[in-house]
Image (cartoon, rainbow, N blue to C red):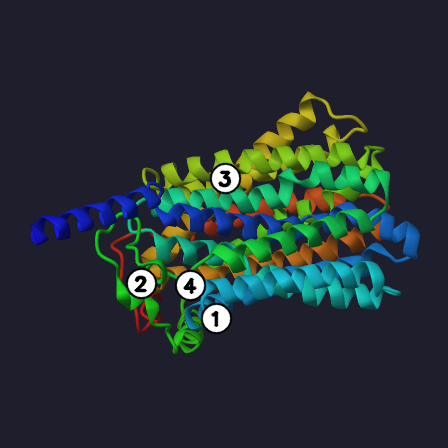
Amino acid sequence: MGYSVDMSEQVQQQVGVTSRRLIHPAWRMTALAAAALLAAGSYTTIAGLITEPLVMAGGWSRADIGIAVAINMVLYGAIAPFSAALMDRYGSRSVAVTALTLLALSSTLLVTATPSAGWFVVWWGVVVGTGTGCITMVFGATVANQWFADRVGFATGILTAASVVGQFALLPVLSTLMAHHNWHAPTVACGALSTIAALLVAAGLRNNPADVDAARYGESTPDRTLETPKANAAARTLHVLVSCLRSRPFWLLALMFFLCGATTNGLMWSHFTPAAHDHGMAPTAASSLLALVGFANIVGTVSSGWLTDRVEPRVLLAALFVVRGVTLASLPTIFTSNIDPALITFAVVFGILDVATVPPTISLCRHYFGVDGALAFGWVNVFHQLGAGAMSVFGGVIRENDGSYTLVWIVGAAACLAAAVISGTVGPQKNSMPISSTATRAK
């Protein structure tokens, strides 16, 4: 009889656990991480939205603002590899909450303590750059790997989509706020999003499944080794960098991604909205086009990942860069004050191509650097942000000197063609090479 009671209690306990976990906690963590990525992503594209109001209200030059945006973009890329080490050491939740709090603080400082362009460089370039650099897709990949043994790609896709929504899809809302108030309104709105996300992440995000006595999605037994932080993660991050710097494929991929960043983030984040203003287009209309770019990004990334498994990555990259170059070269001839079919087509095509270069580049990094492929891609992505920062400044200088963005789009198209050529010289895709301790053999 006692045995039956014990069995009954065990069954009831098991039913209780099952009912509480009808939805695996991994999906809840994905939703919380998505909230963090969305909030951080909202900062990455509003620089272009608030450029004109800052020029008119503060009397600053576009070059001044371009310097702040350039520093922001460089930090956004450079901090990401180290944020992975911080997440290993202190946990994803602590890093995310700290970064989101920093972003919320930066919004307050931007609207209350920015008497000159120099302070804008500090708040936007350094503080926002640091905060957003801690919550990139490195954060998304970390959460996905911690919580998923199966369907990792699907989870990563959700998190990538959240970041894209933050970067582009919120722009119409933010531009409407600015139209009814001033540039302070979208800045404060981003701060509010960061505050809400910080509270949600602090309350609900856990660093690994063992924290809630669960296994990763797709596993039946909790992996207790995930509880132990990797104290040498920062050293490994730097070691991989040193090894990569001795590798010819790394430098070719880095140069290709430098040009990729210049022709995507460097153009669309910083110069598209000001260029639209030059053509008489309202900020809300320009933001709607960028939102369309963002939604097309999702389609492009998923399709590119599917093609990467079936097409030689170098060939795919070359094709993507050539078509991107053609779209940029066409922009001066189709830019008008109103949204028309030509501009809609540009937004859709450019959006499909925008992030589509990431899956084949990750594939090449995995091939040449084996188990260190993810970290190698993190460092390749630093050059992506360096290119974005360089184009942010260079484009502003061209606009100041020429009074037009036409040459900026032409330079961007030429950079795409150069990237297409470089992608074909990286080297043939042969067998993968596991090089955990030394990437130097990938020469």
Q: Residues within 10 Å of mark 1 (few under 14, many from 20)?
A: many
Q: Which of marks 4 and 2 is nearer the N terminus?
A: 2
Q: Which amino acid does label 1 sit on?
A: Leu
Q: What residue type is labelled 2?
A: Val
Q: Distance between the residues labelled 3 and 2?
A: 26 Å
Where is mark 2, residue-wise?
371
In the image: residue 15, left or right of residue 25:
left
CA separation in Å, label 3 and label 1: 34 Å
* Mark toward the viewer: 4 or 1: 1
User: Looking at the image, which residue sits at the far front?
Assistant: 1
Quickly name the residue at label 3: 320
Give the quadrant of the C terminus: bottom left
Which residue corresponds to the image point at 42% horizontal and 40% vertical from the top-left?
316
Three-letter residue code for mark 3: Leu
Mark 4 to mark 2 CA distance (whole Å) = 9 Å
Residue 148 picture location, percent across and down: 33, 51
Mark 4 vs mark 3, foreground winner is 4
Label 3 vs label 1, nearer the camera? 1
Counting every numbered tag in the picture gives 4
User: Which one is in front, 45 or 417?
Assistant: 45
Which corner quadrant of the image does residue 62 belong to? bottom right
Q: Can residue 434 be seen in this view?
A: no
Task: Mark 1 or mark 2: name the one nearer the start of the chain.
Answer: 1
Residue 340: mark: none
Structural crowding at the residue carrying mark 4, measured as other residues with C-alpha within 10 Å and reported as few (<14), some (14–19) or many (≥20): many
Tell me the amino acid under the disc marked 4: Ala
> In the rendered image, which residue does mark 4 sit on?
376
